[in-house]
Amino acid sequence: MLTKINFAPEGTLENNEYILDYGLGYSLERGFGWVTQSSLDKANTTPININENTRDRNESDDSVTDSLIHLQYPVKFANIQPQANPNPSAWEYNLDNGQYLVTVSVGDPTYLNSNHFINIEGNSVISGFIPREHQKFTTATTLVEIDDSKLTIDAIGGFNTKLNFVEITPVEAVQVNFGLTGNTLDGYIQDSGSAYDDSRGFGWITEASIGTNQTVPLDISLNTRSREDAAPNSLATLTHLQYVADYNNPNSQTTAAAWEYELNNGQYLVEVNVGDANYTDSNHVINVEGNKIISGFTPTASQLFQSGSKIVNVQDGKLTLDAIGGFNTKINSINITSVALIDNNASELNFPENAIKINFGTSTTSAPTGFIQDIGQGFDDHRGYGWVTQDSLTTGQPQAIDLLTNVRDRHTVGTDSNSLSESLIHLQYPTALDDFNDSVTTAAVWEYELANGQYEVTVSVGDHKYTDSNHVINIENQNAIAGFSPSASELFATGTAIVDVTDGKLTIDAIGGDNTKLNYLSILPIDSDFGS
């Protein structure tokens, strides 16, 4: 269950989605509150009341970012708010031990006099965010492990850090082993081929009933096997999804089967293992929620197993797995982990009016309001922007290249056409990947004609569905994103660089990266004479 906390003065108009924190000292009975920063390294932290550090700016109807609490009220401002507590403080919240995705927001709609730092469970999440008039807030999400029954958030390293809200989502992690009854593994749910049952919340159905109004439960317990003498741990057991009729086990179920598991709607990282320690008589295919995770794996004596992973979207309360397209597919195990994704929405990013804003995506993708849509066309003098080959940059005569087949629209967040993170373009499509849609494997660079001068350029990289990248972005030879390797809990990264354009073109490359994917960018002229 998602927990949301908003920091605000007592009496602030409540947002029903959020618990209001008024700055009271931590208490076990309430389950959350404030402690002194200096006591964090002690066995028992010291509660502190900082209710006089809360503010409600009353500048908008959005009470979530309109209100805040100072974690480090500056002593030099004591004459302004003499009741404020200048002792650096940290926040604690009681939680069961386990993994959580935590989102925090910092900023102030009225003042820019901060250098915001946020650490969660001792790990830096926001490091030195200095607000500007066009970007007063920033948010960050991280995966944390709680082992002391408390979530701890501090602002060590910052100056006048101001916290708006915290959101806490427990990570739903499920590990299922498929095989004979009794072959249980520590940490795994054992699935022994029983038909789907609502009370249990998982099990098998007929493949033919997928997508119908009423799926048909199917018992395939006689399709389970154990190869414990030949394979380790979760690979030792398996279940046939498509038992071949002319094989010599007359009791096995030959009706093609699919598997379902009840889940809250949302996005999940799904990892599956297929294979058989004793036989290579399969062409394994695994689809989850219609997404192919294992694509026609034919085992050999030297490679009996294969694993695959992908982020999928559950929309009907059940994760559905099938082997459509395979032959005698055998599944060993599945891991399912919930993923909280930040939807970079144009309405939330608050770009300045005079910024040039580019969204990268397909020709059928609706660009958010105010964005130019780049669909991967080669650079053209008349259009004034586009793509050139990376190798041609050094020749002095950049060679235009079309990347029309390298754009994607993931359709994972929903139907909101303003979702900037939904679409992307590959700058370095890997030759090792399937040649999907005749994708271009030549490394490419993006250029945009600009008057010479200084600009602040912000870029976003990432992909809602895949984590197969090491994203690098260089802007005018200045690194903005340095080797961002995404994970299930952190799929996107943004970077900003202040650069000088001296040749009439802004140039952005991914040299040093692997399968870099660009979502969007903004270009803001810095010189006061620009944009007039």
Image: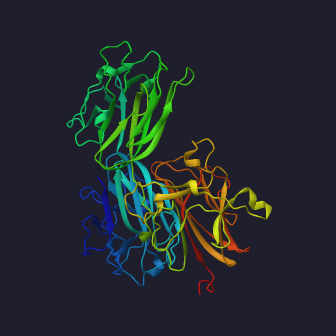
Q: Residue placed at 55% from the left, 76% from the top?
A: 355
Which of 20/49 is in front? 20
For residue 229, above or below residue 506: above
Which of 518/89 is in front? 518
Q: Position of residue 31 (x, y in %)?
A: 27, 56
Q: Position of residue 473 (x, y in %)?
A: 62, 59
From the viewer's perspective, is 289 left or right of 214? Answer: right
For residue 84, above or below residue 271: below
Which of 388/127 is in front? 388
Q: Residue placed farthest to the left in the image?
A: 199
Q: Position of residue 130 (x, y in %)?
A: 53, 72
Residue 86 in which image quadrant: bottom left
Residue 82 visible somewhere in the drawing: yes
Q: Position of residue 43 (x, y in %)?
A: 39, 51
Residue 524 in which image quadrant: bottom right
From the viewer's perspective, is 88 left or right of 6? Answer: right
Q: Residue placed at 29% from the left, 24% from the top?
A: 220
From the viewer's perspective, is 252 left or right of 103? Answer: left
Q: Residue placed farthest to the right in the image?
A: 395
